[in-house]
């Protein structure tokens, strides 16, 4: 069972994301539904993908599932570099 309201969980996650020292992590979007917090957006490396998940994981209750849907790669002129 997830403790805390959906609104408070989202606020905690967004606050943690905004405090990250990494600008790309600060642009990560999150949404909470049915006990799962989804991370969406794009970061340049798998390291930043892990950092985003770690930052959010420390900010929300342990009972909250995290679905890290962040894409890795840089988009330039319609191309994706992986």
Image (cartoon, helix red, strand yellow):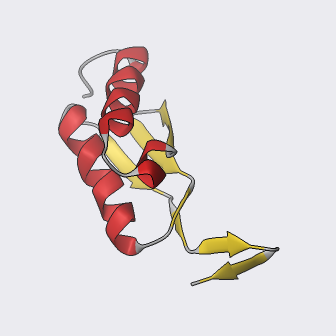
Seen as rendered, the residue at the extreme bottom is 82
x then y, percent, for residue 66: 35, 48
| 45 horizontally vs 47: left or right | right
Q: Where in the figure is residue 17, as x and y percent of width and height?
A: 37, 38
Identity of the residue drawn at 36% across and 52% down? 22
Q: Quick one: 63 or 51, which is closer to the camera?
A: 51
Q: Is residue 8 left or right of residue 73?
A: left
Location of residue 56 with respect to 47 vertically, above or below: above
Q: Position of residue 26 (x, y in %)?
A: 44, 43
Query: Which x, y percent locates residue 72?
Result: 52, 71
Front residue of 28/1: it is: 28
Which residue occupies the extreme right position in the image?
A: 78
Quadrant for residue 80, please give it: bottom right
Image height of 65 relative to 51, above or below:
above
Frontmost residue, 1 versus 70: 70
Name the residue located 24 percent from the left edge and 28 percent from the top edge: 1
Instruction: Tell me if residue 3 comes above or below residue 33 in the rendering.
Output: above
Measuring 56% from the left and 84% from the top, which residue is drawn there? Answer: 82
Q: What residue lies at 47% left-to-right and 32% top-to-bottom?
A: 32
């Amino acid at each position: 069972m997830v403790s805390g309201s959906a609104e408070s969980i989202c606020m905690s996650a967004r606050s943690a994301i905004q405090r990250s020292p990494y600008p790309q992590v600060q642009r990560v979007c999150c949404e909470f539904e049915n006990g799962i917090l989804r991370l969406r957006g794009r970061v340049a490396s798998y390291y930043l993908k892990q950092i985003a998940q770690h930052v959010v994981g420390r900010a929300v209750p342990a009972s909250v599932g995290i679905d890290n849907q962040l894409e890795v790669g840089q988009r330039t002129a319609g191309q994706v570099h992986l």
